[in-house]
C-alpha cells in the first residue's frame, strides 16, 4: 500500500492539478501548554512549515488532548468559522452573549466569529481528559453577525465507515477537498469515475491523525473511501472553495 507520493506533495499555495497531498500525523508539529497537548496539521504559533501554511480556506487543523480541568481563554477572534469536534470527554464553551455550550463525545460546535467574538474553552470534567479536533476556516464574507450552532458548518461532513461498506466521495467542482481520519484506518481508492471499492491492494492507506488533500482535477483524487483495519472508522470531509 502506498502512503502517498512525497515528491509530488505541495502546500496550500499550489493550485495546479496533480497528485493528492498527504499530511501524516508523524509529520505534524506538536506543542504543549497549559495542560493542552496539540498536534497541528498546518503552521501555527512557533511551528512554521512553509510547505504547509494551510489548505485553501482551511487555516487550522488541530488535534488536542486536554488534561482534566484545563481551560483556554481565547480572547476575541474575528472573521473565522470554527469547528470543534469532541472525540472523547466533554467540552465547555463560553461564547459570551451567545451562551455557554456543553458538547459531549461525538458532538460538535460551530462558531462563526463574524465581526468578533470572545470565547473561553474548557475541559468540562475535573477527572477525565478531553480529546478535541479543532478546525478554523476563512469565511466567504467578513464582518458578519456572530453565530453558534451545535452542528458542522456547510461543507463539513462526518462520515462513519463500517467494514465492507465503501463510501463514494462526491465531486468537488471548482474547489478542493480535505479528508481527515478521526478514528480507525481507511483506504482512499480510485481515480476519476472509479466505482466505490473495498479493494485495499490499491490506494492510499490512512490511520487516525492522518489527512489527505486534493484539488478538483487532480489525477489521483480518490473516488471512494473504505474502512481497512478490520473495524469501523470515522472521518471528516471538508469541501473547500478553490
Image (cartoon, rainbow, N blue to C red):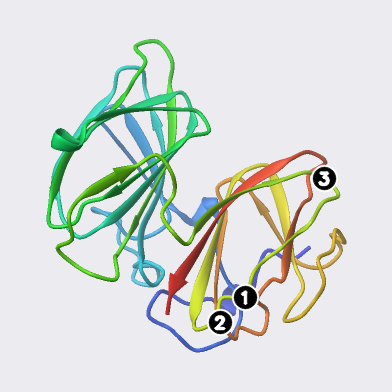
Q: Earlier in the sequence, mark 1 or mark 2?
A: 1
Q: Give the SS element for disc 1.
A: loop
Where is residue 84? Give x, y as percent: 39, 42
Nearer mark to the viewer, of 3 and 1 = 1
Where is residue 199? Give x, y as percent: 87, 61
Q: Name the residue rendered at 72%, 81% in the picture.
A: 192
Please name the residue that numbered disc 1 is placed on: 171
- Within 10 angstroms of label 3, few (less than 14), some, or many (20 or more) residues? some
Q: Nearer the viewer, residue 64 or 226?
A: 226
Q: Name the residue rendered at 87%, 63% in the picture.
A: 201
Where is residue 65? Give x, y as percent: 41, 32
**Tag 1 and tag 2, C-beta contact below 8 Å:** yes
Q: Quarter of the image holding residue 42?
A: bottom left
Residue 216: mark: 2
Q: Earlier in the sequence, mark 3 or mark 1?
A: 3
In which quadrant is the N terminus drawn?
A: bottom right
Please name the residue that numbered disc 3 is placed on: 163
Q: Earlier in the sequence, mark 2 or mark 3?
A: 3
**Tag 3 and tag 1, C-beta contact below 8 Å:** no
Q: Quarter of the image holding residue 219?
A: bottom right
Amino acid at each position: 500500500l502506498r502512503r502517498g507520493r512525497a515528491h509530488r506533495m505541495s502546500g496550500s499555495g499550489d493550485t495546479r492539478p496533480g497528485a493528492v497531498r498527504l499530511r501524516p500525523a508523524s509529520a505534524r508539529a506538536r506543542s504543549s501548554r497549559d495542560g493542552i497537548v496539540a498536534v497541528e496539521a498546518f503552521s501555527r504559533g512557533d511551528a512554521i512549515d512553509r510547505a504547509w501554511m494551510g489548505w485553501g480556506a482551511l487555516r487550522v487543523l488541530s488535534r488536542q488532548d486536554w488534561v482534566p480541568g484545563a481551560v483556554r481563554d481565547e480572547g476575541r477572534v474575528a472573521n473565522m468559522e470554527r469547528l470543534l469536534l469532541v472525540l472523547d470527554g466533554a467540552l465547555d464553551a463560553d461564547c459570551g452573549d451567545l451562551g455557554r455550550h456543553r458538547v459531549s463525545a461525538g458532538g460538535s460546535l460551530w462558531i462563526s466569529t463574524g465581526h468578533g467574538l470572545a470565547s473561553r474553552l474548557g475541559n468540562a470534567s475535573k477527572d477525565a481528559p478531553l480529546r478535541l479536533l479543532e478546525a478554523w476556516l476563512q469565511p466567504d464574507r467578513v464582518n458578519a453577525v456572530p453565530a453558534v450552532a451545535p452542528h458542522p458548518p456547510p461543507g463539513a461532513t462526518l462520515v462513519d465507515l463500517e467494514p465492507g461498506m465503501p463510501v463514494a466521495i462526491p465531486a468537488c467542482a471548482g474547489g478542493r477537498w480535505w479528508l481527515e481520519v478521526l478514528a480507525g484506518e481507511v483506504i482512499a481508492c480510485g481515480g476519476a469515475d472509479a466505482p466505490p471499492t473495498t479493494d485495499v491492494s490499491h490506494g492510499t492507506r490512512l490511520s487516525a491523525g492522518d489527512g489527505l488533500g486534493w484539488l478538483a482535477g487532480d489525477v489521483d483524487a480518490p473516488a471512494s473511501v473504505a474502512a481497512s483495519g478490520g473495524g469501523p472508522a470515522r472521518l471528516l470531509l471538508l469541501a473547500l472553495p478553490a
